Amino acid sequence: MTATRRIGAAWARVPVQTRAYAGLCLASALWASAFIFGKVVLAELNALTAGAWRHALAALVLLPFAWRGRRAADLRAGLVPLAVMIVCGGVLYPWSFLAALERTSATNTALLIALNPALTFLLAPLVGEAYTRRGLLGIALALTGAALVITHGDLSVLTSVTPARSGDLLAFAAALLWATFNLCARGVVTHLPHALTNTLVYGLGSLALFALASPQHPVQQLAAASSAALASLAAMVVLSSVLAGQLFLYGVHSVGVGRTVVFVYVVPVLTAAASALLLDEPLLPAQILGGAAVLAGVWVTTRVPRARAAAPPHPASVDAPVNERAA
């Protein structure tokens, strides 16, 4: 047996929940890397153009895998939630996020979009996942920690967030759109291979983004970009779009959407740490405290009490893994 097969056989013996959580930890690190690579990309490409190329190239990378798994897809069963995922996650979310950034501060935008996992968790019963007091406590801890990290400990920033400003409303709408995307993913992952789902979301979403970016000449921008910007864009495509996107859907499929989305709160913590190491940005004590609160919240949300861990899981609970299915 080759080393690759031995590793594969050993990985197959790892419990599904453990695999899902390991994948989500990696996905959080890959999403955080996008902020570092994104600084290089956005120095030469505007945000709409970068988003359009990122989605289009991710769809191209995933296309062979999507084609290979097409026969396993029950497109009719997952068509409605998939269409909502494409509209909300592939088109409306990128637009509303960028529109919010144009009208309010980056901090306000980040704070309001950080509501996405909390909204997803609270709305999870709509897709058959009951939530618990433990889960609510974990989400609250993680949200508080993320706010500390994003605001650098200056929580007075929260008083500047107001529904009277269109930018803040758009940022909240973006969080709601992202939560809707997450919830609809729960209804798609059991019917479509993950690669096919992401290919459709990225591919069709990129068409809309290219249409929005057309006045900014996205082809000419890409052609004029430096090798550093192109390499950073490629890293974002492969790491934070393709690989992290697959791991996210695997997490939704294996442990439910309620437990999966809490890992989104790890992203600002890892981003702050990476910025301190790679970009010489200061890491403040409040951010360290916030990071500890995020990790505690993730632990509380994902931990299964021993008494319940021994009992047969109920498929409608966020504490129960759904049946595993190959991506």
Image (spheres, rainbow, N blue to C red):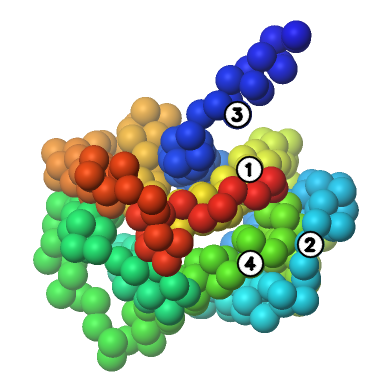
Foreground mark, 1 or 3? 3
| Disc with the residue nearer the chain's start (2 vs 1) | 2
Please give the residue where the numbered disc 3 appears in the rendered image.
12
Task: Give the image location of residue 187, x and y in percent.
Answer: 58, 70
Identify the mark at residue 243; answer none if there is no mark.
Answer: 1
Q: Amino acid at mark 3?
A: Ala
Tell me residue 285's x, y (percent). 14, 39
| Residue 280 rendering spot, x and y as whole percentages | 35, 32
Provide the secondary structure element on which disc 3 rests: helix
Real-space Cα separation, disc 2 to disc 1, in angstroms: 20 Å
Rendered residue at 64%/61% (across/down):
190
Left/right of residue 204 with respect to residue 23 in the rendered view: right
Read off the residue under disc 2: 73
* Above or below: residue 9 compared with residue 301: above
Is 280 located above or below residue 65 in the figure? above
Q: Amino acid at mark 1?
A: Leu
In front here: 235 or 225? 235
